[in-house]
C-alpha cells in the first residue's frame, strides 16, 4: 500500500493547475505565428542567410521558373527574390518536379561568385543563396 500512496502524492503534485483568471507563460498555447514561422528564401537578408549558412532548416520558397538539370543528381530552380542584388535558387534531386510555393527542408549555402571573363564576355561578381535539398 505505501507504493500506491507515493503514486498518489506524485499524481497530485502533477495536477497543480493555475488559478482561473491568472495566466502564466507556461500555460499559454503558442500563437499561430510562432508555430508556422519559417524562413522565406525570397526575403532573407544577407545577415540572416549568413546565420543560416550550413544549417538544415525548413524554408518557404516561391519558385519562379521550371527547373533545369545542372548535374546528374540535381535540378536547379530559380526563386522569387526581394531584390536583384542576390541570386536565389533551390537545388532539388533530379526528377522532382516542383512549382509555385513550396515548403522544403534543405541546407542553405551563401556563395560569393567573383567577377570573371569567359571569352570576350565579362561577368560581374554576385552573391547567391543556394538551398540544397537532399
Image (spheres, helix red, strand yellow):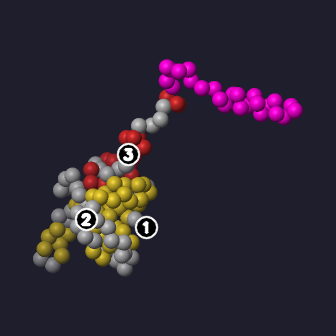
Q: Kindly give the residue lying farthest to the left in the view shown.
A: 120
Please provide percent x and percent y for residue 110.
33, 58
Mark carried by residue 37: 3
Give the class, few, some or many, for how many residues have Cα within 10 Å of label 1's Cα (few <14, many ≥20).
few
Mark carried by residue 134: 1
Please provide percent x and percent y for residue 46.
29, 50
The first of marks 1 and 2 along the sequence is 2
Q: Secondary structure at mark 3?
A: loop
Q: Secondary structure at mark 2?
A: strand
Q: Are marks 1 and 2 in contact (CB under 8 Å)?
A: no
**Which residue is located at x 18 percent, y 56 percent?**
84
Give the left or right position of residue 9, taking residue 103 as reference.
right
Q: Secondary structure at mark 1?
A: loop
- Residue closest to the eye, 126 or 119: 126
Q: Is residue 6 magenta?
A: yes
Q: What residue sits right under mark 2 in the picture?
A: 78
**Which residue is located at x 33 percent, y 48 percent?**
48
| Inter-mark Cα distance, 1 to 2 | 17 Å
Give the class, few, some or many, for how many residues have Cα within 10 Å of label 2's Cα (few <14, many ≥20).
some
Magenta segment: 1-24
**Which residue is located at x 30 percent, y 76 percent?**
69
Amino acid at each position: 500500500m505505501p507504493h500506491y500512496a507515493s503514486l498518489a502524492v506524485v499524481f497530485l503534485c502533477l495536477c497543480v493547475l493555475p488559478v482561473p483568471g491568472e495566466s502564466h507563460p507556461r500555460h499559454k498555447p503558442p500563437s499561430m505565428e510562432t508555430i508556422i514561422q519559417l524562413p522565406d528564401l525570397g526575403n532573407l537578408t544577407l545577415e540572416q542567410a549568413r546565420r543560416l549558412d550550413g544549417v538544415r532548416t525548413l524554408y518557404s520558397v516561391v519558385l519562379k521558373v521550371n527547373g533545369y538539370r545542372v548535374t546528374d543528381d540535381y535540378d536547379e530552380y530559380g526563386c522569387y527574390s526581394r531584390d536583384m542584388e542576390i541570386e536565389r535558387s533551390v537545388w532539388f534531386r533530379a526528377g522532382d518536379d516542383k512549382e509555385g510555393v513550396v515548403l522544403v527542408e534543405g541546407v542553405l549555402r551563401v556563395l560569393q561568385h567573383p567577377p570573371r571573363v569567359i571569352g570576350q564576355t565579362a561577368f560581374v561578381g554576385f552573391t547567391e543563396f543556394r538551398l540544397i535539398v537532399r
